[in-house]
Image (cartoon, rainbow, N blue to C red):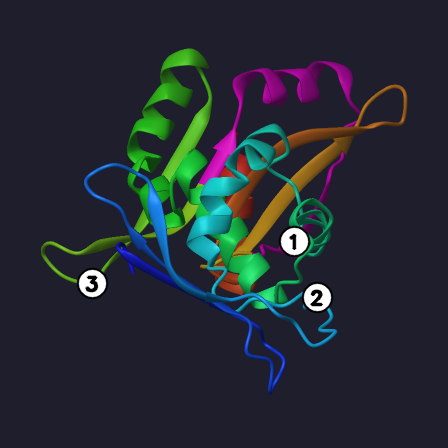
Amino acid sequence: DKNRLKLKCMRRGCKWMVNVVKWGNDDAWHITTSELNHKRCQKSKFNKHIKSSWLAEEYLKKFRVNPRLKAAEFKKKVEQSIGLCIPMKTAYRARTKALAMLSGTDDEQYKDLWRYCEQLKLNNPGSTIVLKLQDDGPVDKRFLRFYCCFAACKEGFKVGCRPLFGVDGCFLKGKYEGQILAAVGMDANNNIYPIAYAVVERENQETWEWFLNLVKHD
């Protein structure tokens, strides 16, 4: 706890141990009892007291430099730096908490969607930005769909691309999942040219009709 700490050997039968208590009102610690004789014990790489919250704070700078750091790679870095193995579940939780400290949680990001859409319209005149909500009652309104087609993209497609485009969808990985639908064209260099995209709850006829009607309007 905050005032007492006990260290002991994990090997069964070994009496090695140290008891310490906090000394006064400062940060000094005082050893009260100890038994320092080992029985040829090997160092263990596992420590159940390492928590994901501590790891998130301790390695926050690494996630700030590389937010795409994967849990498996983070697990290896912990082992290399402090010589201890942590479960993959702990590494994943620590990564999630560190990213939440840096950029907020998924829930907080959804709260900023209104302002995000207004900023897109303000800084990109002529763009089509649509935010569709799921109405569950007079007060509770939740995110359902989002559509974005920048003015520069639609004008560039009409002026400099072939008069055809392709559509496709893919899964979104995250807490709330969903799918992203995209419409892309091909420019004069045969490169992919983004036209519009949407985030929807699932891929079906209704969501495709909603997306393609907006693309058709643009």
The stretch in magenta equals 147-173
Q: Seen in the image, is 28 located left or right of residue 139?
A: right
Q: Please tell me whether mark 1 sits on a helix, a strand or a loop.
A: strand
x and y percentages locating residue 143 in the rendered image: 33, 51
Q: Seen in the image, is 208 located left or right of residue 28?
A: right
Tell me which residue sits at (55%, 37%) in the image: 215
Q: Could you say which is closer to the camera, residue 25 or residue 59?
A: 25
Crowdedness near tag 3: few (<14), some (14–19) or many (≥20) residues, C-alpha within 10 Å: few
Tell me which residue sits at (63%, 80%) in the image: 11
Q: CA distance from mark 3 to mark 1?
A: 27 Å
Disc 2, disc 1: CB below 8 Å? Answer: no
Q: CA distance from mark 2 to mark 3?
A: 57 Å
x and y percentages locating residue 13 in the rendered image: 60, 87
The stretch drawn in magenta includes residue 170: yes
Comparing labels 2 and 3, the label whose residue is closer to the camera? 2
Q: Earlier in the sequence, mark 3 or mark 1?
A: 3
Crowdedness near tag 2: few (<14), some (14–19) or many (≥20) residues, C-alpha within 10 Å: few
Name the mark on residue 136.
3
Furthest residue toward right: 189
- Name the residue that disc number 2 marks: 43
x and y percentages locating residue 80 in the rendered image: 73, 48
x and y percentages locating residue 23 in the rendered image: 26, 46
- Name the residue that disc number 1 marks: 169
